[in-house]
Amino acid sequence: MARPLALSGQRRELAFAALFLVVWIGAPFWRIATLRAVNIQDDIYASDLWNDRLPARAFVGRTIARGELPLWTPGIYTGFPALADVEFGALYPSNLLLFGSLPPYVAFAYAQLLPLFLAGLGVHLLARRLGIGRGGSLLASGAFALSGFFVCHLRQLNMIDAACWIPFVLLGVEKLLATPRAPALAMLALVWAVQCLAGHPQISYFTALALVPYTVARWRIVRAGETGRGLGLLDWVRVFVTDRSVLAVVLGVALGTVIAAIQLLPGLELAALSHRRGGFPYEQAAAFPAAAGSALTFLIPYWNGDPATDTFRGSGLFWEQ
């Protein structure tokens, strides 16, 4: 009886965390949640949110409602490969579900709130997995869900759609490092594939970069005590790269990439036809550097002023810094 009771307790705790996040996110965004307002977020010509994210997702929804796949849109120039434009998120489950079943503006409202909820829920699960108490896990989930990154980048909906899966990816790594079994492997592959389908490859790229030191550090804590104690550096590296749990992490990411290839491969083909084919010159890549003082905004977001009161005096755009 102990196991079912423990499982029941976990479910109640998860339900409470979900309810907490609904209230926590719903409080500042209640007008969007109750469909009393549409979040546009002004930018140059009304922002990516209004000019790109909404019409792209509305196209996906209309196509799905007709029983077709969102492969091609006639609404851009004389026609454009929608599947190959990864920012469409043509196969992202949230876009298919929300915009395929709800009116565009209703789907648009919930599509902005859903990644905040998922981000918070993922951090709660990860924190509990790491042994943090209930209160600390709720605090972490709330702080992450309404962090400056997520709120400022609501205008780049595909960016937060991808970023909200980061804690779930790390949770999959934690599960595999503890016990490399098929369910944990499937979880990591699935969440990695979903993140890749969300429509912002840069976030997946950053996630992959972070996974390397994270996996090394956590393996030393979780597994090295069993297999790597007292070894020299080279022997330690050999044990690490041949450990079943580490290989399972690599396999999970690889399988997820294969699943997402249905979106990634057309995107690579389209990129090969663009002006960026063959590489991106350093001069262009470094054309709009952030000022050194912008680093302080990691700790003090309004160090350079607040665009809402027309006091922002930093370089570039506030939300881009």
Image (cartoon, helix red, strand yellow):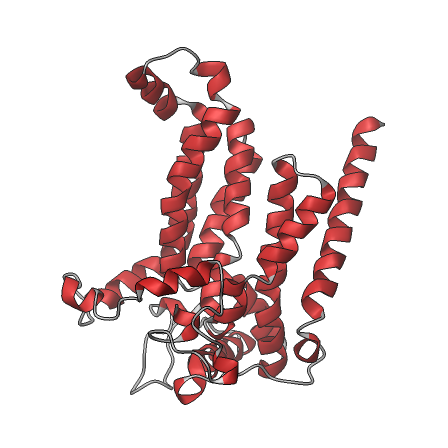
- Image position, residue 281 (x, y; %): 14, 64
Residue at image x 77%, y 46%? 13
Does 279 sit left or right of 90 as displayed?
A: left
Camera sees residue 281: no
304 horizontally vs 34: left or right: left
**Which of the 4 quarters of the picture holds residue 175?**
top right
Q: Residue 197, relative to residue 10: is it above or below?
A: below
Q: Residue at x 60, y 49 (%)?
A: 123
Residue 287 seen in the figure: yes
Residue situated furthest top in the rendering = 230
Picture coordinates of residue 66, whole percent (x, y): 53, 78
**In the rendered view, would you say 293 is above or below 5?**
below
Above or below 6: residue 309 = below
282 relative to 169 in the view: left or right: left
Q: How many marks?
A: 0
Residue 199 percent across, percent down from the top left: 42, 64
For the C terminus, which image quadrant? bottom left
Q: Residue at x 29, y 87 (%)?
A: 78
User: Along the horizontal axis of the image, is 52 left or right of 222?
Assistant: left
Say which quarter of the image contains residue 213: top left
**Residue 221, percent from left and from top:** 50, 26
Q: Quadrant of the N terminus?
A: top right
Q: Tell me which corner region of the image, top left, top right, bottom left or bottom right, holds residue 120.
A: bottom right
Write the residue at 79% across / 34% down: 6
